[in-house]
Image: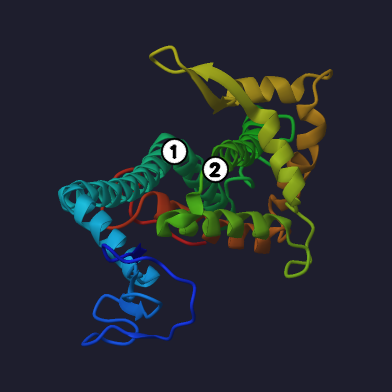
Amino acid sequence: MLARPRGERGGTGAGSARPWPGEPGDGGPQGGSRAWCRGRGRPWVVTRRARTSPQRSRSVSAGGVVGLWAPAIVAGIPGLLALVVALLTGRSQRRNAADIEKLRRTLDEESKQRALVQRYQEPLARAAYDLQSRLWNILRGPFLETHVHEPEGRGWLYARDSTVWLFAQYFGWVEIVRREIQFLPIGEHDQSRRLQSALGKVSYVCSTDREINDGTFLIFGAEQRALGELIIVEGHDAEGRTRTSCMGFAAFRAAVEDPDGQLGLWFTKLQEDTAKTAGKNVGRERLRLLQHALVDLVDILDPAPAHVRFPSDRGRA
């Protein structure tokens, strides 16, 4: 800006510019300056506008913005903390819910296993006990020898066919339990593992042809399942619900004697092996090991010291 003193005329003559007397040369506290130029008349006064630093301008603006929003920011902190707490609490609750659901499924599986054992424990234990009892009588008593001399007599037919039926009944209940077990993780419990181990031992004694050279009463694993399948029937319990069971002795004997049925074909070998064992030292090693394995199975299904289902004096032949 040019400020012209009153009463002076401007000129175009050369002059020298120097700072205004008593003032800084270029700048000052605000970065402005004044200078005078001597021409023909009195000096012209030259006033320069002060410059503001860009950095200072931005800092002043930023400070203003911060100052403007500071109350809002402070007021929003509690809400932000509440949101964080809610998120963490929800995550913890979801994790706890997942743990509870996992525990519930575990307890539900255990309940199903206990219900399975309770449902089939009695008939399976009864089948195993009756078969081992018959084997003990064959090995230690004259059960077969008493009637073997009358091959067509009523006593012999009963001794032979009832022995075969006891084998079939045991295989039938084992097959029923196997069908139920395949849908449950029953191997997680110690009692279940012991039960499966005992069942496997019985099956092995019946099917092995290496440790026992005698082929009498040799029944391979698939044959054991087939004999069990043939004797399984669908019935109803006292409340009218469907219940899987095994043929009784009367129905079994009628089915075996039916010339058009399949049971006679499948159980012919067991009938012949029973006749071979009567009064002879044939097949007795397998029957002895089988009787011991069945006693071990009964001990698991009806453990000591209670023995609530069967007598405690379970001898081994």
Residue labelled with disc 1: 116
Visible in this render: residue 275?
no
Between 185 and 91, the one lying in front of the other is 91
User: Quick one: label 1, few (<14), some, or many (20+) residues within 10 Å?
Assistant: some
Please tell me which residue is depicted at 70% across the width and 30% down the height of the picture. 230
Question: Picture coordinates of residue 69 (x, y %)?
Answer: 23, 51
For residue 96, above or below residue 34: above
Q: Amino acid at mark 1?
A: Leu
Camera-side residue: 207 or 144? 207
- Residue 34, numbered label: none
Distance Cα–Cα, label 1 vs label 2: 8 Å
**Horizontally, is 207 left or right of 118 in the view?**
right
Q: Residue at x 37, y 80 (%)?
A: 38
Residue 89 locus on image (x, y percent): 25, 49
Which residue type does callout 2 highlight? Ile
Residue 48 x, y percent position in the rendering: 35, 71
Q: Is residue 170 visible?
A: yes
* Within-10-Å neighbours for mark 2: few <14, some 14–19, many 20+: some
Q: What colour scheme has been applied to the protein in the rendered image?
A: rainbow
59 vs 42: above or below: above
Task: Tell whether 25 sits left or right of 206.
Answer: left
Pointer 1 with pointer 2, Cβ within 8 A: yes
Kindly indicate the quadrant of the structure image that contains residue 35.
Answer: bottom left
Indicate whether 242 appears above or below 302: above
157 up-or-down from 3: above or below: above
Residue sitting at 79 percent across and 35 percent down? 266
For the N terminus, which image quadrant?
bottom left
The x and y percentages for residue 55 are 37, 71
* Lower sequence index among marks 1 and 2: 1
Disc 2 designates what residue?
181
| Left or right position of 162 against 208 | left
